[in-house]
Image (cartoon, rainbow, N blue to C red):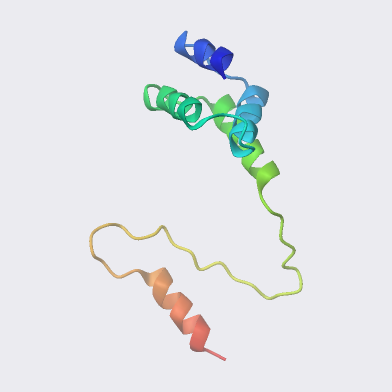
Amino acid sequence: MRNILNHLFEYKTLDRKEAEEVLTSIAGGVYSESEIAAFITVYLMRSITVEELSGFRDAMLNLCIKTDLSDFDIIDVCGTGGDGKNTFNISTLVAFILEITP
């Protein structure tokens, strides 16, 4: 992690593969909490690049638990989690309606 942090502190960026490897290593418990905190701090100090974001996306897709739902008739009713303005959350209502509708 030291080399990665030094690289980033020099205002350099990660390529797609490097970003994927870093996130995979973080998820795998390779780095300490302080190393992870330092890594995240770098991204609070600058904008993330498309290459880095793509690499992080690749890592997340590789790390996710793949689920086969092809035997089910499913629908996604997730919203944005609310707008923080105490307005009515329509996706929550949809979930309640779908639960009680035969």
Residue 38 locus on image (x, y percent): 44, 24
Looking at the rendering, which quadrant does residue 72 occupy? bottom right
Q: Nearer the viewer, residue 21 or 81?
A: 21
| 97 versus 36 height, above or below | below
Q: Residue furthest bottom?
A: 102
Q: Residue at x 41, y 57 (%)?
A: 80
Residue 37 locus on image (x, y percent): 44, 29
Q: Residue furthest left?
A: 85
Classify the position of the C terminus by image quarter: bottom right
Q: Is residue 26 left or right of residue 35?
A: right
- Image mark count: 0
Residue 98 locus on image (x, y percent): 51, 82
Classify the position of the N terminus by image quarter: top right
Residue 88 locus on image (x, y percent): 29, 70
Q: Nearer the viewer, residue 73 or 24?
A: 24
Looking at the rendering, which quadrant does residue 75 occupy? bottom right
Q: Nearer the viewer, residue 96 or 39?
A: 39
Q: Is residue 98 left or right of residue 92?
A: right
| 67 versus 88 height, above or below | above
Q: Residue at x 61, y 36 (%)?
A: 29
Q: Residue at x 27, y 57 (%)?
A: 84
Q: Nearer the viewer, residue 4 or 34?
A: 34
Q: Residue at x 61, y 28 (%)?
A: 22
| 48 versus 71 height, above or below | above
Q: Is residue 85 left or right of residue 25?
A: left
Q: Is residue 16 left or right of residue 90?
A: right
Q: Residue furthest top?
A: 10
